[in-house]
Amino acid sequence: MLNTVLSARNGQASGTPEAAVQVEGIGKRYPGGVEALKDVTLDFPAGELTTLLGPSGCGKTTLLKIIAGLLDPSKGQIRVKGKQVHGPGPDRAFVFQDFALMPWATVLRNVAFGLELRGVAKAEREATARKYITEVGLTGFEQSYPHELSGGMRQRVGVARALAVDADILLMDEPFASIDEQTRRKLQEDLLQLLQIEKKTVIFVTHSIEEAVYVSDQIVLLSRRPGTVSRIIRPNLDHSTDLEAARRDKAYLDCVDEIWQTLKQYLV
Amino acid sequence: MADRTAASRRGLSEEVAGAGGHQIVERVPSDRQWLWRLISFAVVFGGWEIAGRIPVSPSFPTFSATIVALGEMLLDGTLAGAYAETVQPLILGMLLCSVMAVLFGVGMGLSRTVEWFSLPIFIILQAAPMAALIPLITFLYGIGLTAKVVAVMLMSAPIIVLNSYKGIRNTSPSLLDMSRSFMATRRQQIVKIILPSASGLIFAGLRLGVAAGVTGVVLAELLITPTGVGDLITYYRSVAEYPHMFASILSIIIFSSVAVTLLQRAETALFRPET
Ligand SMILES: Nc1ncnc2c1ncn2[C@@H]1O[C@H](COP(=O)(O)OP(=O)(O)O)[C@@H](O)[C@H]1O
Ligand SMILES: [Mg+2]
């Protein structure tokens, strides 16, 4: 049973999986003259979690925001399921590093906010929101306000909000970076578990090698600014049997080391 | 056996007392706050009393004489009559300018064009010494109610406008990105993100605006034509009844603080479910 789940996931991974998002020749120069990205071409396979990993300031957020349609690229184009996109769309949902929750709204309203903006009726959107609040493990906190929650719980709200709009693609910008180490590990495990239920294509930004290796199907190493694709690595960890065991796996440790050897050259 | 029950019962009751004690411990800070407030009032008023008894100046009354005068004026209706006059231009001015000033500040925050041509005016207005503008107001609007209303508006509008503007501009960029990523229209973004996020600073601006409006009306009553509280102050000074003059000044300070506190209470009750 577990094996079938595993092979379903791996089945998509091996061979040439269909790309959910294609980044073609993307370049970005900010108005001030900073060149953040240079000629980035990349495919994000459908149903997989791809990590963008690189030193801070290398353009990870910039690339993610361009994919989200929040920033216009200076060059190149973004295709989502084969179609070129020019702005935000219902097919993509963003999870923010600083959570981006409305402090004046309850957890319930925050999670339902994407649907509220789409004009979904209150009863319906709250029912959907409750379902995802349960899924991320926040049952009982529907009426709490963000300031009453810990950092980890706040990001669970951010994840639930992104899931609630039922987008196929999740864009996560260092979602766990501002959360303490223990909580972060738990969130990583819960995210993987959640993704086994919710089949999503995830683009995950991080600057933590360990996090990238642990959660990813595919890791894209970016070079120092202007960011370009330096290497693509597939950790091939087996998460299906035991989420914890993966961290002791030899493949995990080898992969961490291999990435460290590559990234070291970008540090001065 | 009986002993043990009694002992355990005592233990239990101690626990309950402990819990009760805990609640008391939690209440202490607010008791302490009151205590500190009382002490600070006592120090200020005590200092005033001593300064009045020395006396620092022949025209400086003691605190007790001032309070007696205040009581007299409250009882014989002098204060009520004066405030009935003073609040007219104040309320008119605040009604006329608060809504417009908030809208203007919000407009400045939302539109570069509006910002470009009006921000400098309000910054200059806020920096300008009002007393120096009063002759200009009388020149333009005479010495009636209109001039006083204008004085109130000139004092309070810049603060309200600039605070509302800052509130809009301070909206968290990541909340703006969030609303865009979930495809909010510009209208939704303004109504659901920008305005709620700016409301704290907008209300702070309104409170400061009311306090400034009170200053404006008193200035106008002192400098244009003596009416209301301004008339009381001028009159009691001219007849050298200093305790009454100070009581009038004290009443204005109390009036202004009470108005600002009430506004804050109303804001918390109406617009701040999260606190
Ligand atoms: N709005 C902006 N204007 C100018 N430069 C920017 C802006 N945003 C980011 N940058 C610059 O672009 C580079 C890449 O930024 P970013 O994508 O945030 O990096 P990362 O997320 O990998 O840390 C950085 O050097 C940053 O200083
Ligand atoms: Mg970043």
Image (cartoon, grey):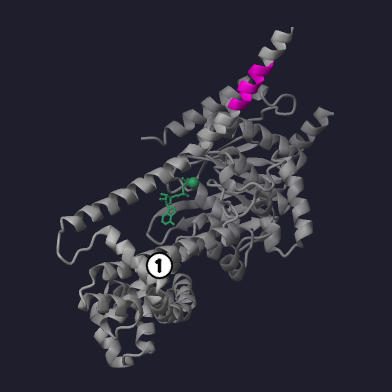
Please state the horizontal and vertical placement of residue B98, each as a whole percent of the image. 46, 75
The answer to whether residue B73 is magenta is no
Q: Where is residue B175 in the image (x, y as percent from the top left)?
A: 54, 56
Query: What is the chain identity of the residue bearing mark 1?
Result: B
Whole-percent x, y for residue A216 in the image: 63, 36
Q: In the displayed structure, does residue B7 sit left or right of residue B25?
A: right
Secondary structure mostly taken by the magenta-highlighted segment of the chain: helix
Identify the residue shown where x is 21% and y is 78%: B238
Specify whether residue B247 is in view: yes
- Count of marks overlaid on the render: 1
Hey, which quadrant is residue A218 in on the image?
top right
In the rendered view, tell whether residue A176 sits above or below residue B190.
above
Range shown magenta = B9-17
Query: Residue A36 at x, y = what percent?
Result: 44, 52
Question: Would you identify the image quadrant in which residue B146 lies?
Answer: bottom left
Q: Which of the pair A198/B253 is nearer the observer?
A: B253
Which sits in the foreground, A45 or B178?
B178
Three-letter residue code for mark 1: Phe
